Amino acid sequence: LGFEAGDLSDWTATGTAFNKQPVNRDGIAQRWGGQISNKNGDYFIGGYEIVQDAGTGTLTSAAFKIPKPYGSFLFGGGETPTTRADVVLLNDNGSSVIFSAVGANREQMRRVAVDLRKFVGKSIVVRLVDENPGAWGHLNFDDFRFHDEPPVNIEPSAGAWRSIQNP
């Protein structure tokens, strides 16, 4: 689930938060000096780069099956649940959020790990949510991938993000 095609193929957008995404310039480095996006490849979802904090909306991936017990993605942005990345389980009764990550008012993306052991073989979507048109009302996202083992170098104590693992 990267964005190297330079478009939102296999993603559905609502609202204005994700207009003209993905982006291929790292405006984060220009705005923050010591920070860079940490994007993987050329393109990423850079929430501030086009509409800044004003946009709201969602960006939802196409459904896909979980092939491995762990997932991860790059994420940064505002520190409240109004700007988040959700992993949503799809089932016969509808859908439910099984994992959410929010930022820590930091644009530089960090790798967020997701424990998917209970859901291998089931279908999910990734949903980016921006409900905040005010300060830190944006998010950055890239490079969702699966892993056989828990990803290494995950530092939740570093203050770059926090996650809420749902039961």
Image (cartoon, rainbow, N blue to C red):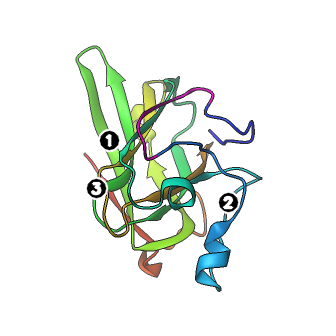
99 to 30, vertically: above or below: above
Residue 101 among magenta residues: no
Name the residue that disc number 1 marks: 98
Q: What crowding class fits label 3: few (fewer than 14 Cα within 10 Å), some (14-19), or many (20 or more)?
A: some
Q: Earlier in the sequence, mark 1 or mark 2?
A: 2
The quadrant in which residue 20 appears is: top right
143 to 140, vertically: above or below: above
Q: Given the image, on which type of amino acid does mark 1 rest?
A: Ile
User: Looking at the image, which residue sits at the far bottom?
Assistant: 34
Looking at this view, is 156 or 8 the one in front? 8
Residue 12 among magenta residues: yes
Name the residue that disc number 3 marks: 82
Q: Which span of residues is magenta-colored?
A: 9-17
Q: What crowding class fits label 2: few (fewer than 14 Cα within 10 Å), some (14-19), or many (20 or more)?
A: many
Query: Which quadrant holds the C terminus?
Result: top left
Q: Given the image, on which type of amino acid does mark 2 rest?
A: Lys
Query: Which quadrant holds the N terminus?
Result: top right
